[in-house]
Image: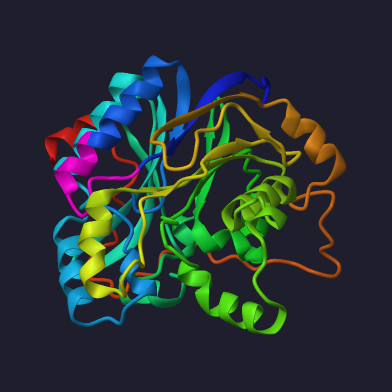
Amino acid sequence: MSSYPVFKAAAVQAGPVFLDLSGSIDKACALIREAGEAGARLIGFPESYVPGYPAWIFKAGPMGHSATLYGRLYQNAVEIPGAAVARLSKAARDARIYVCISVTERERGSLYLSQLWFDPNGDLIARHRKLKPTGPERYIWGEGDGSMLPVIASPIGNLGGLLCWEHLVPLTSAAMSFKNEQVHVASWPVGGYVRGGPFEAMLDIRDAHIGPISPDQNPLSPIEVISRNYAMATQTFVLLCAHVMLQDAVDALAPGAPPDTYRIGGGGSRIIAPDGSSIGRNLPAGEEGLVYADIPLEMVIYAKYMCDPGGHYAVPHVLSLNMNTNPAPAAQIGAAQDLLPMRFTDIQDNA
């Protein structure tokens, strides 16, 4: 880059209208416009913000009430193109802001966990699908491929994002480093479990052998530890975007789970600099809103000066990455068609 601007970014800490496509899009568009009015040039959203994260998968099997909830998720998923995408596109254009929003995407008969990127013109410029859904998420979502692992050149830096446990896969972060990512959206799911959620099996073993651990000894949540590590390991600014679980989600999830499994609350959104520090003003746990911070992109120069695993700090004579960036559809019928990028006018015409 020839210039390294200072700009305002916004990380969402909020819940959707659970399993309600229209209501969740209403809320997302309002947050996008709020961020734009506050002068932000980039906004990031939590995982599957539209229409909500399928938190039941860690507490119940795939049948019964879980299947009912899956049906609601399926019927309220986002299609590209479609009316939901058109509304998000218009909100990005109205706010003149880059938007990275995570959705459950429906393509033909299957669902996928995606991040959709819009530019300030309202164009849909990129899509990332989670490469490997985590554990029981495989009941819900299919896999992405290497053609959907973008890093986007923009006037505010090279923009990229990952979903949840992808931040723990060293080869994935190595790929993002090689693409010279500079500003990263880390989309995380809801954490409103009374105990553990996906960590519960590990906690059972830990507590059985060494006893309970005081929260005072562990003030950072796992997602914050992981996100700070990602910022330092890849020399990026990280927008950590986390859900808040609201009463509508608790009410929908409760019938399929043991008593008191879910609770209102969660959050933990923040913006992290390449040195691992949390910058900006954070929100209290459970409070909905936007976390803002000014991002001085020039910090990336000096983070790379010390360590650039995608360049001078790589050891290709010992370790190298073989990255397949080709699309991998389940079937190819007729000529291949790439939907993205989609211009604002085309999005609106196909709504």
- The location of residue 90, given as percent across then percent down, is 24, 28
- The location of residue 206, given as percent across then percent down, is 65, 78
- The residue at the point 29 percent across, 40 percent down is 342
- The location of residue 283, given as percent across then percent down, is 50, 33
Answer left or right for 132 relative to 51. right
- The residue at the point 27 percent across, 28 percent down is 30
Is residue 110 something one can see in this rendering?
Answer: no
Answer left or right for 149 relative to 278. left
Residue 125 image-quadrant placement: top left
Is residue 217 something one can see in this rendering?
Answer: yes
Q: Does the magenta stretch include residue 23?
A: yes
- The residue at the point 30 percent across, 82 percent down is 61
Reply above or below: 172 against 339. below
Q: Which of 3 and 276 is in front in this view?
A: 276
Reply above or below: 230 against 138. above
Magenta extent: 15-26
Answer left or right for 220 relative to 338. right
Q: Nearer the viewer, residue 135 or 156?
A: 135
- The location of residue 175, given as percent across then percent down, is 63, 57
Answer left or right for 132 relative to 26. right
Tell me how the rendering is colored: rainbow
Q: Nearer the viewer, residue 250 or 291?
A: 250
